Image (cartoon, rainbow, N blue to C red):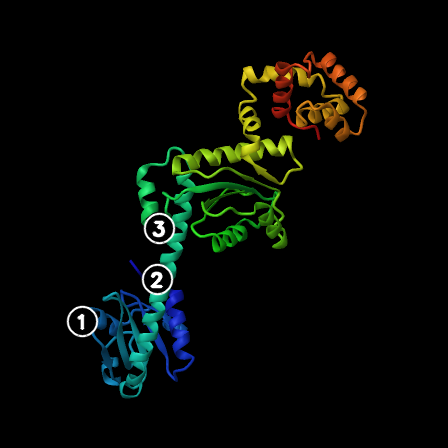
Amino acid sequence: MFALDHALAQDIVDRAMAILPCNVNVMDYLGIIIGSGDAERLYTRHEGAQLVLANSRVVEIDEQAAKSLNGVRQGVNLPLMLDGKLVGVLGITGEPEQVRVYGELVRMTAEMLMEHRRQQASEQWRQQRSEDLLSRLLLADCPDSLVLEAEQLGLQPQLPRQAVLIQLPAQSQAGGAVMTWLNGRYANSWCVMREPTLLYWCRAAGRERDDALLLEQFDEQGWAVVRMATVERSADLPGLRQACAAASDLLDYASHVQPGQRLLRLAPNRLAVLFWRYRHDPLAEGLTEPLNRLRDHAQLLETLRGWIEYSGESQACAEALGIHRNSLRYRLEKIAELSGCDPYRTDDLLRLCLGLHMSPRPA
């Protein structure tokens, strides 16, 4: 229910008195003056306003009648209506014959201000409720009742969406600005700040977007995004929840294993992220043992990464590393000697490859 408060009442008074040569009062639904050009009258009872509230009509009070009422001066008192309901009283001090002409104009202005304030409050409530709902919709235990409420608020939870996770620098204050910018440019976006530096952006599926260009636009706005992780489109809400979890794992994986990458896509990193998610499982931990024996040999680790990247193509790998093929063969043999896994054997190479995916890159 809408209720007049002091701030709105005083705003009405100040606006009216900027153009009227008389005092203006605004009373609440109890007949208490909550806005006035005369500060001494604030929060006193106005019996004239109580007559208006009791009869829902304009009450004019002349000088003689004012003497018989408490807290009243001569003037015109008009009911303030909102949606057909009486919510307060507007009083204009002065000879009724002189100030009556101002009454309807000031009342119309006051009621317009009340309607505007109510719309603002309603929009603020809707925005806050939408933010609360979005944070819950992305959780696996979200009840169906909240999904229904999201539909009623126009959040369109049934739309296919793509999960994007944006990481901002520590102590960044740009989260709200980024959310506003995205919502203003991408229709039907969901933006949720889960942590001070992590923004979940669920954009409505549509035409392909240039994410590299988007990062450049962030930079141009002065928002130094650390990295951005994207997942393939999800057809429904359960799929979107899983995609958000995958985006979180992808970002965590990238921050430890590929710290230099700002733009990450799940598709080419799916296997790596899968093993990264379960890297603390006892079965998975055993896979990193061979790689751990190479930790103090940066050159051999670089060689191993090149060997995997070029799928065992000796010439291409050697050229990328800037070494002779014989040097490459020597390094691979050294890798086999130290790790106990032969990079020429598929099973051993897979173990080394998974070990790289599950191990943070040395600082």
Residue 228 is labelled as: none
Look at 34% across and 67% down and name the residue there. Answer: 114
Image quadrant assignment for residue 48: bottom left
* Residue type highlighted by circle 3: Gly
Q: Which residue is mark 3?
A: 154
* Residue type highlighted by circle 1: Asn
Labels 3 and 2: the sequence-earlier one: 2
**Rendered location of residue 147, percent (x, y):** 34, 41
* Residue type highlighted by circle 2: Arg
Identify the element where label 1 is drawn: helix
Say which quadrant the C terminus sits in.
Answer: top right
Residues 63 and 240: in front is 240
Image quadrant assignment for residue 287: top right
Q: Which residue is mark 2?
A: 118
Q: Which residue is mark 1?
A: 55
Foreground: disc 1 or disc 3: 3
Identify the element where label 3 is drawn: loop
Foreground: disc 1 or disc 2: 2
Say which quadrant the N terminus sits in.
Answer: bottom left
Q: Are marks 1 and 2 in contact (CB under 8 Å)?
A: no
Foreground: disc 3 or disc 2: 3
| Disc 2 crowd, CA 10 A, few/some/many (<14, 14-19, 20+) | some
